[in-house]
C-alpha cells in the first residue's frame, strides 16, 4: 500500500495557543479520509497545513514522498473544494473549470477537451457558458468539484463543501462526490463536522478533539467499537456505566456499578472483560421493560420522548441518569418503575476513563 499523504508528528500554534499536538496521519493511494469533529478541534487547521496556507511549528508533511512542509501553496499541486465554492464571478462555468489548466500552461484544444469531458462527468455541459451568479448552490458545488478534479491532482481536499446546501441536496451531493472520487481514484481528505456525512462518504474517518486524533478507523468500527469514552459519546453511546467485576463464572461475568447495580454479561458477546471497565450502551442498547424481576438496572422513568420507532425515556437509576428505549406497544408514564435490560449487540466494553 502506497501512502501519498503523510503527516508526521505535526504541531501547530495560533500565537501562543496550540491547535494541533503531535498529529500523525497517513492516507493511502485512492483513499478518502474524513477529518471529523466539533468546531475548534483542529480539522480545518490540518487541511490548511497540508494546503500550505499555514506552516507547522513542528513535524513534516509529505505527498508522494515529496516534502511539502515549507513549500508555498501554488507549488503543492493540490485540488481544493471550499465551503463557499470560491468561483470567479466574471468567468463562465467552462472558464472556471479550465482555470487551473490555464495556470498550468494547457491551452487550446487540449484544455477545451478536458473541460468538456469534466463538464460531462458532472452533468453541466448545458451550463458551460453560464456565469456563477445564475447557478444554484448544487450547481456551483459541481463546478467547484469539476475545477478541482480537472487538473488531475495527486490529492483532493474538501473543506466543509456541503455546509451551504439544504439537507436533501447535501445527501445528493455527497453521493456524487463519492462516485466521482472513486471513478477518478483521487486520494482525498474531507473535512466536516457532520457525522452522517463523514460515515457515508469515507473509507476511514479520523475523529479529532483538541488537536489530536482520538481514533482513526472505518466508519463501521468507529460506530460499533469506539476506542475510548470520548469517541463512544461522539458516535452516540449515550450511556457510559463504570463497572467492576465481582464474579467470573464460566461463560459469564457479573459486574457491579454504583448503587449496587449488578449485571451479568456474556463473554461470548463482549470478548475479554477486564476487572474494571465502562459498559457503553446506546439508547437502543438499554431496553425498558415492566418486568422488574428480570436481570437489569432498576429504574424510575422520567421524561418520555416519541421517536417514531420507539419511545425514549430518561431514567433515574442507582447508577445515575440513563437514556433507554421502550417499545411502541405500551408507553409508560413518568414515575413508572421498570428495569433497563442491556442488549449486548448495542453495547461495548471500554477502558476506564
Image (cartoon, grey):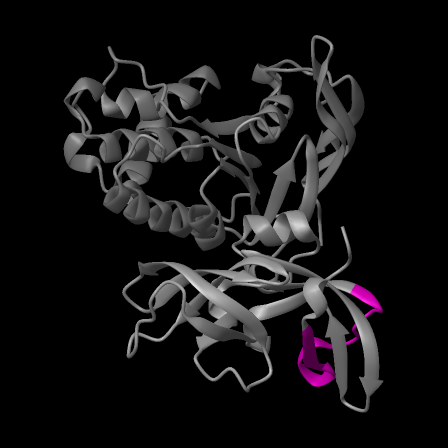
Q: Position of residue 259 (x, y in %)?
A: 69, 64
Q: Estimate the x, y position of residue 346 in percent, counting from the top left.
A: 55, 71
Quadrant for the N terminus in the image = bottom right
**Residue drawn at (61%, 62%), measured in percent from left and top?**
221
Q: Nearer the viewer, residue 129 or 3?
A: 3
Nearest the viewer among 220 and 283 is 283
In the visual, does 247 lie left or right of 197? right
Q: Residue furthest bottom?
A: 250
Q: Residue 271 in the image: x percent, y percent?
A: 74, 77
The answer to whether 8 appears left or right of 156 in the picture is right
Residue name at image x 47 percent, y 47 percent: 195
Q: Is residue 118 shown left or right of residue 62?
A: left
| 152, above or below 77, in the image | below
For residue 113, above or below residue 292: above
Which picture quadrant has residue 276?
bottom right
Q: Quadrant of residue 146?
A: top left
Q: Reply yes or no: does residue 275 show up in magenta.
A: yes
The location of residue 96, given as percent across then percent down, is 31, 21
* Residue farthest to the front, as pictured: 335
Is 222 above or below relative to 265? above
Which residue is at 56% across, 48% downward? Answer: 234
Residue 280 in sight in this render:
yes
Q: State which region is magenta.
A: 262-276
Q: Between residues 268 and 4, which one lies in front from this camera angle?
A: 268
Q: How many marks?
A: 0
Residue 64 in sight from this viewpoint: no
Is residue 325 located in the magenta-colored stretch of the structure? Answer: no
x 64%, y 22%: residue: 49
Amino acid at each position: 500500500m502506497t501512502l501519498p499523504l503523510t503527516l508526521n508528528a505535526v504541531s501547530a500554534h495560533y500565537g501562543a495557543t496550540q491547535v494541533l499536538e503531535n498529529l500523525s496521519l497517513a492516507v493511502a493511494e485512492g483513499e478518502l479520509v474524513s477529518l471529523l469533529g466539533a468546531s475548534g478541534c483542529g480539522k480545518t487547521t490540518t487541511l490548511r497545513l497540508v494546503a500550505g496556507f499555514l506552516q507547522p511549528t513542528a513535524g513534516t508533511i509529505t505527498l508522494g514522498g515529496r516534502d511539502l512542509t515549507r513549500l508555498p501553496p501554488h507549488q503543492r499541486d493540490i485540488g481544493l473544494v471550499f465551503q463557499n465554492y470560491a468561483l470567479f464571478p466574471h468567468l463562465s462555468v467552462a472558464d472556471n473549470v479550465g482555470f487551473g489548466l490555464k495556470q498550468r500552461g494547457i491551452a487550446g484544444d487540449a484544455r477545451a477537451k478536458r473541460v468538456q469531458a469534466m463538464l460531462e462527468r458532472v452533468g453541466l455541459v448545458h451550463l458551460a457558458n453560464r456565469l456563477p451568479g445564475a447557478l444554484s448552490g448544487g450547481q456551483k458545488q459541481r463546478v467547484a468539484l469539476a475545477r478541482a478534479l480537472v487538473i488531475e491532482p495527486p490529492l483532493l481536499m474538501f473543506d466543509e463543501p456541503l455546509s451551504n446546501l439544504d439537507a436533501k441536496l447535501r445527501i445528493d451531493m455527497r453521493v456524487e462526490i463519492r462516485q466521482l472520487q472513486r471513478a477518478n481514484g483521487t486520494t482525498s481528505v474531507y473535512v466536516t463536522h457532520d457525522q452522517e456525512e463523514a460515515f457515508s462518504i469515507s473509507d476511514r474517518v479520523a475523529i479529532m478533539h483538541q488537536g489530536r486524533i482520538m481514533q482513526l478507523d472505518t466508519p463501521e468500527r468507529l460506530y460499533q467499537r469506539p476506542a475510548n469514552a470520548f469517541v463512544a459519546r461522539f458516535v452516540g453511546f449515550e450511556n457510559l456505566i463504570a463497572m467492576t467485576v465481582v464474579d467470573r463464572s464460566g461463560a459469564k461475568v457479573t459486574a457491579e456499578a454504583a448503587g449496587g447495580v449488578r449485571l451479568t454479561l456474556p463473554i461470548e458477546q463482549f470478548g475479554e472483560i477486564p476487572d474494571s471497565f465502562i459498559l457503553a450502551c446506546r439508547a437502543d442498547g438499554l431496553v425498558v421493560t415492566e418486568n422488574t424481576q428480570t436481570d437489569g438496572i432498576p429504574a424510575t422513568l422520567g421524561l418520555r420522548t416519541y421517536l417514531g420507532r420507539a419511545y425514549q425515556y430518561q431514567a433515574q437509576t442507582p447508577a445515575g441518569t440513563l437514556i433507554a428505549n421502550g417499545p411502541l406497544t405500551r408507553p409508560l408514564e413518568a414515575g413508572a418503575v421498570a428495569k433497563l435490560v442491556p442488549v449486548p449487540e448495542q453495547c461495548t466494553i471500554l477502558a476506564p476513563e
